[in-house]
Image (cartoon, rainbow, N blue to C red):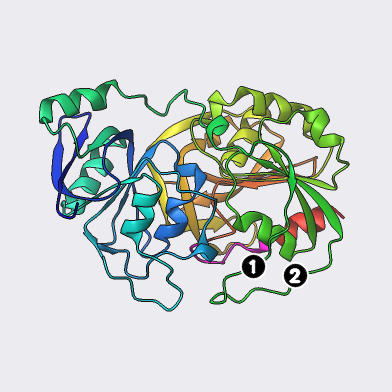
């Protein structure tokens, strides 16, 4: 029902009251924010947001609707979605429906009409917090207590909730007519992509540079990976605390040095852990399409898309790992490579979607690394 009251309660006792859209009910998650001005559809369907209630800092969301070509997975993965103002009448020739209807069909709760600036400022000062979004039980005290009792992110393995059920060959190409890509090349290399919650634009980018891509669930063993005789191994993004995904770390320990490797986001963190570094939780994370990163090799600044709440601790890198990229906002590690083995990784998202394409060269680098 339009204009139905909904509330967001944070674990610190703060309560925001606004209007509901999308589905009704109640949901818990870590409350985070994203600074992107566009790309809400890609954000909603990014599996890395599993377990999180996402707040958009840009005030008007939903104006270009929803279409099937820009999905990053089959369904939305956010626990809830918060905006300042929802556009209920989409206006774009590619639109196939409204954001309101899309969330309702996929049972995702939405909240609009709150002061998102105040919420984001609280998250920046206090850090990301556990929260409850509800259209049902609206007693402030009860909601705050539920938020405090809800599960947090530290120590939580969410990968198993988003991995595919079985292996498959990636067949889809580029469907977005608004973005100009290089022509896809005939495949020259076979890549096994470890899917920990992979965005679909990643295998698209691998295909673009001449790779045949076999996708394996992130729970696959080293023997299953090597049995496919890949030329290279890709490690995808995904949700949750990397230190909790012990099975993936153990698998990577058995794979490093045997095949060229390229990791993104969670894949970067898992690779760091497998090679002896440690990870830590960021205060409020990096989420947006405008994050500046220094490429230490070229000296150039890249504007990047990011979505992560954990990071590899730069101070714990073993001697064989060289830091290649640094975040210019907080100087955390954004990329690394091995000094002896053919592997590298980045914390940010070079496949963009949505976002800048400054770092798309990394897929070419991976293709060259495979020989």
Asked if disc 1 and disc 2 are in contact, CB closer than 8 Å, the reply is yes
Give the vertical position of 145 relative to 305 (above or below).
Answer: above
Label 2: which residue? 184
Q: Residues within 10 Å of mark 2 (few under 14, many from 20)?
A: some
Residue beneath label 1, please? 174
Q: Quadrant of residue 147?
A: top left
Please count the marks in the image: 2
Of residues 115 and 220, the one nearer the viewer is 220
**Picture coordinates of residue 64, whole percent (x, y):** 37, 70
Nearest the viewer among 221 and 70 is 70
Q: Is residue 300 above or below residue 146?
A: below
Q: Magenta residues, as a range? A: 354-361
Residue 183 seen in the figure: yes
Mark 1 Cα shell of 10 Å, populated few (<14), some (14-19), many (≥20): some
Q: Identify the residue shown where x is 67% and y is 61%.
A: 205
Gap between marks 1 and 2 measured at Cα: 9 Å
Q: Secondary structure at mark 1?
A: loop
State the SS at label 2: loop
């Amino acid at each position: 029902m339009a204009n139905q009251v909904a509330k967001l309660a944070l674990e610190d006792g703060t309560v925001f009251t606004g209007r509901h859209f999308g589905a009704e009910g109640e949901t818990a998650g870590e409350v985070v924010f994203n600074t992107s001005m566009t790309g809400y559809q890609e954000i909603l369907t990014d599996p890395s947001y599993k377990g999180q209630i996402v707040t958009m800092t840009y005030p008007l969301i939903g104006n270009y609707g929803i279409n099937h070509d820009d999905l990053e997975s089959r369904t939305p993965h956010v626990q809830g979605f918060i905006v300042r103002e929802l556009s209920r009448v989409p206006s774009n020739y590619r639109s196939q429906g409204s954001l309101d209807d899309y969330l309702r069909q996929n049972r995702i709760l939405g909240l609009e009409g709150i002061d998102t600036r105040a919420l984001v400022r609280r998250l920046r000062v206090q850090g990301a917090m556990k929260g409850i979004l509800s259209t049902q039980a609206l007693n402030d005290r009860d909601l705050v207590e539920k938020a405090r009792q809800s599960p947090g992110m530290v120590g939580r393995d969410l990968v198993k909730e988003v991995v595919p059920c079985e292996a498959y060959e990636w067949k889809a190409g580029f469907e977005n007519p608004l973005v100009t890509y290089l022509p896809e090349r005939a495949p020259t290399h076979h890549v096994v992509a470890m899917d920990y919650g992979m965005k679909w634009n990643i295998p698209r980018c691998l295909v673009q540079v001449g790779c045949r891509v076999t996708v394996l669930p992130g729970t696959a063993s080293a023997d299953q990976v090597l049995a496919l005789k890949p030329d290279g191994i890709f490690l995808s993004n995904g949700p949750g605390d990397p230190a909790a995904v012990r099975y993936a770390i153990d698998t990577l320990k058995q794979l490093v040095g045997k095949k060229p490797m390229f990791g993104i986001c969670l894949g970067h963190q898992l690779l760091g852990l497998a090679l002896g570094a440690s990870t830590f939780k960021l205060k409020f994370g990096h989420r947006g399409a405008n994050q500046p990163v220094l490429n230490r090799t070229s000296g150039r600044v890249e504007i990047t898309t990011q979505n992560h709440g954990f990071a590899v601790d730069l101070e714990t890198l073993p001697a064989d790992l060289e830091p290649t990229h640094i975040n210019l906002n907080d100087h955390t590690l954004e990329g690394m490579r091995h000094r002896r083995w053919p592997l590298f990784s980045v914390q940010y998202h070079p496949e963009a979607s949505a976002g800048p394409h400054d770092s798309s060269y990394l897929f070419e680098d991976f293709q060259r690394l495979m020989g």
